[in-house]
Structures are given as structure tokens and as C-alpha cells.
Image (cartoon, coloured by chain):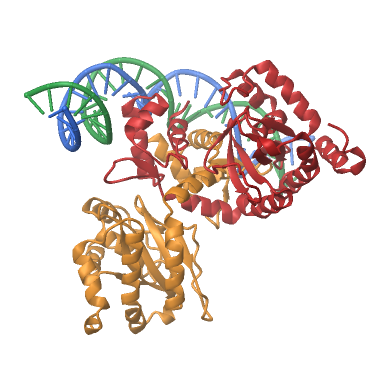
Chain colours: A orange, B red, C blue, D green
DNA sequence: AACCAATGGTTCAAATAATGAACTACCTGT
DNA sequence: ACAGGTAGTTCATTATTTGAACCATTGGTT
């Protein structure tokens, strides 16, 4: 792990529920030496990627990030492109829909929309990263990822977020085969016990998977029949999102999705 | 310059007008060795801070930044706080208003609003960084900055963006004294020949300057009388923005601003 | 008041990781 | 076949990062 990665890694510890982090907490979170962490924090701060609260001495994300997002979105508007699509799909399905993008071995939410038409809702934190082996989004990305990434994740430790998380590499491998055959992933309780979700992959220009489009709901509403009824629209949404992002869906998967959206074939599992 | 800074520095070269940069161009821009730059780019990419276009091989800003902005804005909403204030002031003054924050030795725009009520407008790129010695925003920040930063900038090279940029350290030092006495800065043609602007500083919780609030217009509309008429409202806006951001205006400056906004004192320069 | 247990931050010899000149490989047009 | 332009890689040298031990300050406890 290079110095740059170590420093950038520090930024990853921030989330909506942990918006500012002190030196000591960073040391505990990372397991790295205090001096090392401190120098990294200082260097990040000098570049505007962190700010230090002058009274608590804790660090929070800095303003440099805002400018970079502004550049990225004004020239390659991922969020802006996904926003209407995700919103529309969530209105259509009456459930929370979110799009996430692959970042290394983790999935990062880009945008989510929830029409909140039901009494219970999934609480979704757009600032929380998701593991690849525990959510429908993660599983579908993993299923369509290249061998290098898949093997790296299968080899690495598979944290048990709940008692229903798949932690056995071979069981996970078998599951990924099913997902590839189905063209999307369903998962329930693997990351949050009360949540069921269904996700389809998004692809980049080179045909490699870059993220996922997912619909999530409380387990009670995530019956097989209901998820099945979402299937065609979710796949269509993923296809549109892929195209909007300048990507291409691999031909065989596109054919599979097209077949599914055809009424004659909707009886398939 | 540490490795981390060198890598983060690469991200700074992106802007609205230069949204993707290839290896060779980076080498030219930075003057660093190709191997070094390449390894930095790869490491940034692995962490999601860059993406490589699979066909042109050029790099663009990656999705990791989007998540970080989401975290920052949902927990420490600088942009969200400044947006209404900047918009309102621009509507009030009928000119482009922008807020920028200090990042190291450079100023980065956070938000801008332009009512576009005139035939000519200032073109403002929210993704372009600004030097501290050439714009009204930069000058006012420099004037109220701590000695360390001021001396560092005065010592460093002062690039001549136009023929009216102040490049002589002593002339600049004298100018900063005037600005401190006035409580805000006026500048015309120092960064862009056609633009005149007036800026007031923003302060953090510790009373240190953290940025600036500025009104900018084509030189023709930037007469002394008109700028003078903006003065009280600009200072009031900067005071409100500082408070909204959790900061405090130094007492002596607050008194100066209060005196200015008092009708009895508006005749002063 | 003395003490303890936190916190954040600093130092400097030792170890490791970053560096860069030279290299390969690949296009594109001549 | 070659020239000139990309991007990317190698490996001995060099310089930077590292971390155990250190200090400083704060807040709570006896």
C-alpha cells in the first residue's frame, strides 16, 4: 500500500454518521502509527482535503472536494444523468431506488430517491460505502466484474454484516453464477437484516461493469412476486443508465434483458 | 513537497476547460518525471479519485469525490449555507456574486450566482482556482491572513496574469495595508483585464480568514460610486456568511463594517 | 494538589518506499 | 521501414516515509 493510498484511505472513514474524526480515532480505525497518520492528516489539510476544527482539533472533509465535484459534474455529469432516471424509476416502482458506482473493491452511492409512499421506509445513507458481497448491488457488480476483482474479493475476508451475509467463498461463487444467469441480483438481509433489494449492473464504455442500479425495500414488501414485477423495469432502467453514461451493455446480457422484458418470457425465475 | 501533496496536486490541474488530461500532458504541466506521474495517477485511479477513459487513455476526475462531497455537504453544508446568501446578494446588487474559500495558497470558488440583468456579463468558472495576489477576493484574504501565509505569498513568485497584476512584493504589501484599513478590497483588471470586483473576507471559528465574498462585473460598470454603493451590503453579507459558517468576524473589523453600514459614515473612502 | 488517563502532536535514526534515466510497446502518418 | 507521437515499465540509486519513544495539554478522580 503506497503512501498516497494510505492518505486517501483516511478520507474513506468519513460518513454521515461519522462526519469528523480526531487523530486518536483515526489511529484506532486504521491501526497505523500515530505519527504516520498525523503527517498524512496534515498533508491532506494543507491541500484543502481536510479541515481541522480549531476547538475540538478533530478533522472533517475540506472544501477542495467541492471544487473537484463541481469540475467532474460540469464535464462528466454522472449524478445529473442518473438523477432523473433514478427518481423516475422510484416513482414508478413506489420504492427507494439508488445508483452506486464501483470504487476499487467497494461500492459508493451516487444518488438515491425514495417516494416514501409506504408506512415503512428503508433508511439509506448516501454517504455510506457498501461491500461487494453483502448487498444486491454489490453482488451483481461482483457477478459481472472481471476475474481479477472477483477473485480478489473472494480471496479477501468476507465480513458478516448480519447472520445472513454470505461469508463462504464457494457459496458466494455459486451465487454469482446464478446472478449472471439471471441478469440481475436479489438479496435480502445480507447487509441490513430488514432490507430486501434487487439490482442490475451498469457498464462503462469498454463494457466493464462500473456500478449498479438497485431498488430496496423493507423485507416485508420484498416478496418474490413483487420483485419479479420490478424486474423488467429495473433492467430497462439499467440499460438506459448505461447508455446515458456512455457505456455499453454486453450483447448477451442485453439479449437476456430484452427477453425478460418481453411479456412471453416473464414467467421465468 | 511530500508524495501525498504531489498526487493531490495532480487533481488541481483539472478544470471546466480541461476536464481530462493524459499522462504526457500531466508530465508537461507538472514538470515531473513520467514514471512518477504515472504511478501517482494509477494510485489515484485505484482509489476512485480518477477514472481512465478506456479509449483515449486520458484521466478524468473519478466518482470517489462525489461521495466525499455528499458527506461534507450533508454534515457541514458550506455550499448549501452560502447558496441562498450569494443568490440573494446577487439579486440585490444586480451583479455576479461569488463565495470562495482559502485552500493553501489559492482560492477556490464554492458558489456563484449571476442575475444576468445586463447586456454584458462576467464569465465565471466555478471550477477555476484563483491566485491570492490578483483578484479582489484573493487580496482581501491575503490582507487578513496570518503573517505566515502572507509572507509565503509575498516571497513566492507573483505571476502577472495581466499587465495590471501587482507583481512587486512591496507594492502588494502597501496595498494590503490599505485593504485592512478599508475592511474590504477593490481590484480591477488584475486577473482578467475586463473585470472589476470588490470583496470582503469570511472568517472561521478561530477568527482566521477562511475565504471571501465578492461581487464582480465588467470594468465599465465597476465605477467607484457604484462599488461604494455596494459596500455596506457586501460587508453585511460577509458578516452574515461568516456567522452562518460558524465563524466570528474579528471585533475591530466588525466595528469598521458597522460604521460603514451606518449612513452617517458612508462618505469615507 | 497530586495523579492518572486521555487527548494531540513532535523527534530522529532506521527502514522502506519513491524516484527517474533508460527502456519497451504501441499507434499514426510518411 | 521509419519518424514522432502516444502510454507504460524496470531497477539501481536516493530520498522520503516510518514508528518507538518522547513531550504538552486537557479533564476527570482520589
Which residue is at 41% across, 28% downward?
B29
User: Residue B241: image x %, image y %?
Assistant: 71, 47
Which residue is at 26% across, 55% downward?
A208
Q: Is A194 in front, or is B114?
A: B114
User: Residue C3: image x %, image y %?
Assistant: 68, 38
Q: Is A242 in front, or is A8?
A: A242
Q: Is A211 in front, or is B130?
A: B130
Q: Quadrant of residue A107?
A: bottom left
User: Residue A254: image x %, image y %?
Assistant: 23, 67
Pick out the residue farthest to the front: B119
Picture layout, residue B245 above or below residue B137: below
Which residue is at 41% across, 50% downward?
A76
Picture layout, residue C9 above or below residue A57: above
Which residue is at 22% across, 66% downward?
A253
Kindly tell me whether residue A186 is visible in this rendering.
no
Q: Is residue B154 left or right of residue C24?
A: right
Q: Is residue B243 left or right of residue B127?
A: right
Q: Quadrant of the C terminus of chain B?
A: top right
Pick out the residue farthest to the right: B264
Q: Is residue D26 left or right of residue B5?
A: right
Amino acid at each position: 500500500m503506497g503512501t498516497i493510498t494510505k492518505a486517501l484511505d483516511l478520507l474513506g472513514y468519513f460518513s454521515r454518521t461519522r462526519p469528523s474524526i480526531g487523530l486518536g480515532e483515526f489511529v484506532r480505525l486504521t491501526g497505523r502509527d500515530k505519527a504516520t497518520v498525523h503527517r498524512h492528516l496534515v498533508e491532506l489539510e494543507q491541500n484543502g482535503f481536510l479541515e481541522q476544527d480549531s476547538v475540538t482539533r478533530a478533522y472533517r472533509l475540506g472544501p477542495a472536494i467541492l471544487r473537484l465535484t463541481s469540475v467532474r459534474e460540469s464535464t462528466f455529469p454522472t449524478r445529473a444523468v442518473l438523477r432523473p432516471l433514478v427518481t423516475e424509476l422510484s416513482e414508478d416502482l413506489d420504492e427507494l431506488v439508488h445508483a452506486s458506482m464501483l470504487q476499487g473493491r467497494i461500492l459508493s452511492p451516487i444518488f438515491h430517491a425514495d417516494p416514501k409512499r409506504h408506512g415503512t421506509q428503508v433508511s439509506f445513507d448516501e454517504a455510506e460505502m457498501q461491500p461487494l458481497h453483502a448487498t444486491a448491488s454489490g453482488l451483481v457488480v461482483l457477478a459481472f466484474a472481471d476475474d481479477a476483482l472477483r477473485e480478489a474479493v473472494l480471496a479477501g475476508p468476507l465480513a458478516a454484516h448480519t447472520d445472513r451475509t454470505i461469508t463462504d467463498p464457494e457459496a458466494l461463487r455459486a451465487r454469482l453464477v446464478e446472478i449472471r444467469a439471471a441478469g440481475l441480483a436479489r438479496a435480502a438481509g445480507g447487509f441490513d437484516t430488514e432490507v430486501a433489494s434487487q439490482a442490475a449492473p451498469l457498464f462503462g464504455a469498454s463494457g466493464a461493469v462500473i456500478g449498479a442500479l438497485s431498488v430496496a425495500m423493507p423485507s416485508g414488501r420484498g416478496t418474490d412476486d413483487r420483485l419479479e414485477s420490478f424486474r423488467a423495469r429495473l433492467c430497462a432502467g439499467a440499460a438506459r443508465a448505461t447508455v446515458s453514461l456512455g457505456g455499453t451493455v454486453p450483447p448477451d446480457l442485453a439479449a437476456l434483458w430484452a427477453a425478460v422484458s418481453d411479456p412471453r418470457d416473464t414467467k421465468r425465475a
